[in-house]
Amino acid sequence: MSRWRRPLLVALAVLLGLTVAGHRVVSDVRSSAATSADRLPSGGPVELRPLTSDCSGGHVVLSFDDGPRQHTGELLDRLRDLGLTAVFFWSGHNIEGRGELVRRAVAEGHLLGNHTQSHADLTTGELPSGERVTPWGDAQIREELRRASELLVAKGAPEPELYRPPYGAVNQQVDYVARELGLRLVMSFGRDASDGLVDSHDTEGISAEEIAANVIGPMRDGSIITMHDGLGQATLNSIAALQPIVDAMNERGLCATTEVRPDATGRMLEPGASGAQVPSSAPKASANG
């Protein structure tokens, strides 16, 4: 090979390498931008006012379903900065590959509960995809709950003692199997407002202000508030709603707790309960779980 061709080929190789690297950087930026399409509504630095309540007004439970997902880290950051602890009901299929979030949540004082392995409707066996597991009975219900609990423990959480059925779908058969596994029911809604189970309706495409209003209106001592950390912009809106919720807690002397009262079933297992959602905080109940 002539003396002039070798330097030329080297230069072309370097140029090609820079072009490919540049393409990768641009692709990463575009990918990041696409992922960041979900944004906290504030649009700028957030001035945080943490919980300073003296607890004279009692305690409420903040609960979050469906995680851990892409915004769970941001949610944990906001809870930490506001001085809040919460109860998370996480699904096993979302825990895979996110063990660090399990360990972080436990280390920061949060409580982790069972939300099944695959987010199946425990009364019918219907999966989020619309497919239905057949046959469906005690063995399949047990497997959904058992696998999620075992995965949480394997990733560093204590053995879960609470469960929340996806979609609020529960009946006597489901609860019997769950109790056999040492799990206690915590519903996301009740038969009426007297049950103190507050649905934020954050999965319905509403704003942070609307989420906060749905929570603050009925919030009182003993309230169990349902929110989500697995649904993109809905989760970011819920994160933004935490500040006005905390402001209201400070005004009312309320503190956050992870101790869930024993009558958190929403009376949905009592005779005559249809399983239809009866919201305590807004005119239409959420169908998400």
Image (spheres, rainbow, N blue to C red):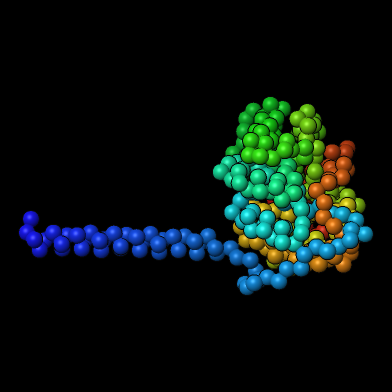
Q: Is residue 173 something that shows in the picture?
A: no
Q: Is residue 153 above or below residue 106?
A: above
In the picture, residue 199 is in which quadrant? bottom right
State the residue lying farthest toward the left. Answer: 2
In the picture, residue 2 is in which quadrant? bottom left
Q: Residue at x 75, y 30 (%)?
A: 181
Residue 105 at x, y percent in the picture: 69, 48
Q: Is residue 28 something that shows in the picture?
A: yes
State the residue lying farthest toward the right. Answer: 56
Left or right of 283 on screen, residue 28 = left
Q: Residue at x 23, y 59 (%)?
A: 13
Residue 123 at x, y percent in the picture: 72, 36
Left or right of 211 on screen, residue 43 = left
- Residue nearer the viewer, 234 or 259: 259
Residue 223 at x, y percent in the picture: 85, 53
Q: Is residue 221 above or below residue 120?
A: below
Quadrant including the N terminus: bottom left
